[in-house]
Image (cartoon, rainbow, N blue to C red):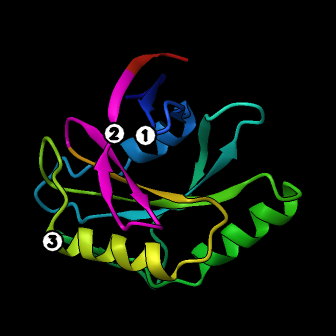
Amino acid sequence: MVGKELIYKLSNDGRIKLSSNVLITMDGFIQREETTPESGGVLLGRFIKYSKDIVIDKISVPMKDDICTRYSFKRLSLGHQKMIDEEWTQSKGTCNYLGEWHTHPEEFPIPSNVDTRNWKRKLKSDVFSARFLYFIIVGMTEIKIWEGDRRTLEIKQLLKIIYGNT
C-alpha cells in the first residue's frame, strides 16, 4: 500500500480517493500479528469543487481513551472531535468529517453486524454537511469502502477503480 493511492467509484459517478499519506498511516495499523488489536479513527477530507469527487487527506488514529481489542475498536477519545474541529477551522471550512475507518483481522474485510449497526447510528446522529458518510475497513490484504446514505440509511460497498502510483 505504501506509495500508492486508491480510488473508488461513488454512487453518483464521482470518485473518492485515499491519498498516499492516509494509506501509509493505515498500513501501520494492519493486524498482521495475532496480538495486534483493531485500530481506527475518523476520515477527513475535501469535496472537490466543480466535480463529484472527494479526497480523503487525513485520518485520526487510536488515542489514549479509545478501546482497542483484537476484534473490536471503540472510538471514545474526545481527541478525534478536537482534530475534526481544528482541521475545519484551519482549513476555513474546506476540510470535512467524511466518516470512520477501522481495521479487521482478516484478509478481505466484511463488516460485522456491529459495524453496520454503528454505521447506521452515525448516519442518524452524527453532524455532517453532506448526504453520505464513508466507512473504511482495512483488512490484512485489502481495503474496502462503504457509502452510507443519511436519507435512506442504505449502505453500499464501493467499487475500487484505481490502484496505482501517486
Mark whose residue sits in front, 1 or 3: 1
Q: x, y percentage for residue 22?
A: 52, 42
Circle 1: element type: loop
Which residue is label 2 attached to? 158
Q: In the current view of this chain or complex, which residue is farthest to the front?
A: 152
Q: Is residue 116 left or right of residue 34?
A: right
Q: Is residue 43 magenta?
A: no
Q: How crowded is mark 1: few (under 14 residues within 10 Å), some or many (20 or more)?
A: few
Pointers 1 and 3 in contact (CB under 8 A)? Answer: no
Please provide the residue range marked out in magenta. 140-161
Q: Earlier in the sequence, mark 2 or mark 3?
A: 3
Numbered circle sitting on residue 11: 1
Query: Residue visible at 62% across and 35% down?
Result: 52
Residue type at mark 1 is Ser
Which mark is drawn over residue 80? none
In the displayed structure, 5 sits above or below 121; it is above
- Residue 10 position (above or below residue 35): above
Q: Which percent across, then down, holds residue 34? A: 10, 57
How many other residues sit within 10 Å of disc 2, few (<14), some (14-19) or many (≥20)? some
Residue at 56% in and 34% down: 19
To which residue does mark 3 refer? 113
Give the CA distance from mark 2 to mark 3: 18 Å
Q: In this view, does 76 lie to the left or right of 111?
A: right
Q: In this view, does 7 lie above or below 162?
A: below
Q: Do the CB atoms of the residues marked 1 and 2 lie less than 8 Å apart?
A: yes
Residue at the (49%, 30%) spot, across then down: 13
Query: Looking at the picture, which amino acid does disc 3 mark?
Result: Asn
Residue furthest out toward the top: 165
What's the residue type where badge 2 is placed?
Leu
- Cβ–Cβ below 8 Å for labels 2 and 3? no
